[in-house]
Image (cartoon, rainbow, N blue to C red):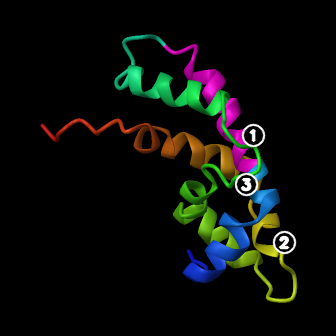
Amino acid sequence: MAAVSLLVEHDHLMRNPQFAARVRVAFTRIAREILTEDPSTPGYPLRVALARTVLNPGDWNAPGLAPVIAADPVISGAAAIGYTPDNADSAQASVTDDQIITAVRRAWNITAGVTPDPAP
């Protein structure tokens, strides 16, 4: 899968207000799911702490967690496919909402600081 350059990823995903807003909503949706998890879920305390932080942001205008999602290989690849230099929104517009929500789920534990279980 193709990936956009780091500068394109930064300028057209991380700093794009529409992309940041879409990521913010995706994190909010997943945060609501996390708060209903079984307390025996691995990493539960950290996962819930992140959920509470996401639901009580300090600044709605900051990019928030958009950089984490912009760096996801699937997101970057989708952005690369749709990116055209003459359209500032082309990279973020080529990423689907489902791709963003899936990327948020993939990034939740690393964003929360949950370390993976050591290999057996």
> What kind of residue is marked 1?
Val
> What kind of residue is marked 2?
Asp
Say which of 113 and 104 sits in front.
Answer: 113
User: Which residue has dot 1 on it?
Assistant: 25
Q: Is residue 21 above or below residue 12?
A: above
Residue 86, image x, y percentages:
86, 88
Residue at image point 66% right, 35% down: 57
Q: Is residue 89 left or right of residue 43?
A: right
Q: Is residue 95 above or below residue 65?
A: below
Q: Earlier in the sequence, mark 1 or mark 2?
A: 1
Residue at image point 82% right, 65% down: 93
Snapshot quadrant of residue 82:
bottom right
Q: What secondary structure is found at the residue carrying circle 3? A: helix
Residue 20 got which mark? 3
Q: CA distance from mark 1 to mark 2?
A: 18 Å
Residue 98 got which mark? none
Snapshot quadrant of residue 72:
bottom right
Residue 89 got which mark? 2
Q: Earlier in the sequence, mark 3 or mark 1?
A: 3
Q: Main secondary structure of the magenta part?
A: helix
Q: Is residue 43 above or below residue 110?
A: above
Residue 107, image x, y percentages:
49, 46
Q: What secondary structure is found at the residue carrying circle 1? A: helix
Q: Is residue 63 left or right of residue 38?
A: right
